[in-house]
Image (spheres, coloured by chain):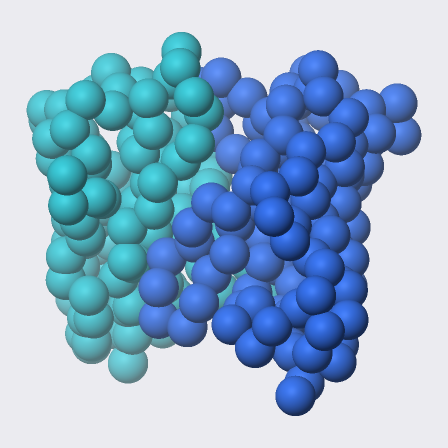
Chain colours: A blue, B cyan
Amino acid sequence: GENVEQHPSTLSVQEGDSAVIKCTYSDSASNYFPWYKQELGKGPQLIIDIRSNVGEKKDQRIAVTLNKTAKHFSLHITETQPEDSAVYFCAAGGGADGLTFGKGTHLIIQP
Amino acid sequence: DAGVIQSPRHEVTEMGQEVTLRCKPISGHNSLFWYRQTMMRGLELLIYFNNNVPIDDSGMPEDRFSAKMPNASFSTLKIQPSEPRDSAVYFCASMLTGGRTEAFFGQGTRLTVV
């Protein structure tokens, strides 16, 4: 089955700086790579996703890059703000086979 | 739509008791997933259903765990008997396969087994 590794487990950045979270996956058949943000006491919510036919996708301050050859994808958050503090999960999968999640990254934005 | 609805939000039970978690997926979604979240293991897929049929239950940890989906709008995850190591947050998620592959999560059920 799919195996997703996520790094780092905790990331602390100064407000206004950029944050980068990286994930690797093992199953070359995976074609869908979403990123979820989980705030305290809530379920994960999708913030951005990318499919295997695209190398990069951007939505305002967040962007995701995908390298299918190397089987890794990354989340980039620019101009970080206090409300970006949360746990972020990457996932890999496709179709009806469900998603395999990374273990999460606790992002801390320091004022 | 109110989103994926899970109940209860919190459950505290004694070891050995039966626990039933409930989920109402988003109307029209044809796939439903149960996940367990712990600090040690992160988000783990337990089982998923497609068109009410269990497709893969290889993530279910033991025979003490069972899940059903009697119709498209309701699913249960049952633990019998419960043990302290089952304490976790259990999430249900649903999605519409064949279209956009976004999975929508419920708020989760925080289970504490004492």
What x and y, as percent, mark residue A6?
A: 73, 52
Q: Nearer the viewer, residue A78 or A74?
A: A78
- From the viewer's perspective, tell me whether residue A9 is left or right of residue A32: right
The residue that appears at 35% across and 64% down in the rendered structure is A42
Residue A10's image quarter?
Answer: bottom right
What x and y, as percent, mark residue A101?
A: 58, 45
The residue that appears at 72% across and 59% down in the rendered structure is A78
From the viewer's perspective, is residue A71 above or below residue A37?
A: above
Q: Is residue A97 visible?
A: yes
Name the outermost residue toward the bottom.
Answer: A111
Figure disc tally: 0
Residue B13's image quarter?
Answer: bottom left
- From the viewer's perspective, tell me whether residue A30 is left or right of residue B98: right
Residue A109's image quarter?
Answer: bottom right
From the viewer's perspective, is residue B90 above or below residue A80?
A: above
- From the viewer's perspective, tell me whether residue A94 is left or right of residue A44: right
Name the outermost residue toward the right.
Answer: A70
Q: Quadrant of the N terminus of chain A?
A: top right
From the viewer's perspective, is residue B92 above or below residue B14?
A: above
Q: Quadrant of the C terminus of chain A?
A: bottom right
The residue that appears at 43% across and 21% down in the rendered structure is B100
The residue that appears at 26% across and 20% down in the rendered structure is B30
- From the viewer's perspective, tell me whether residue A86 is left or right of residue B8: right
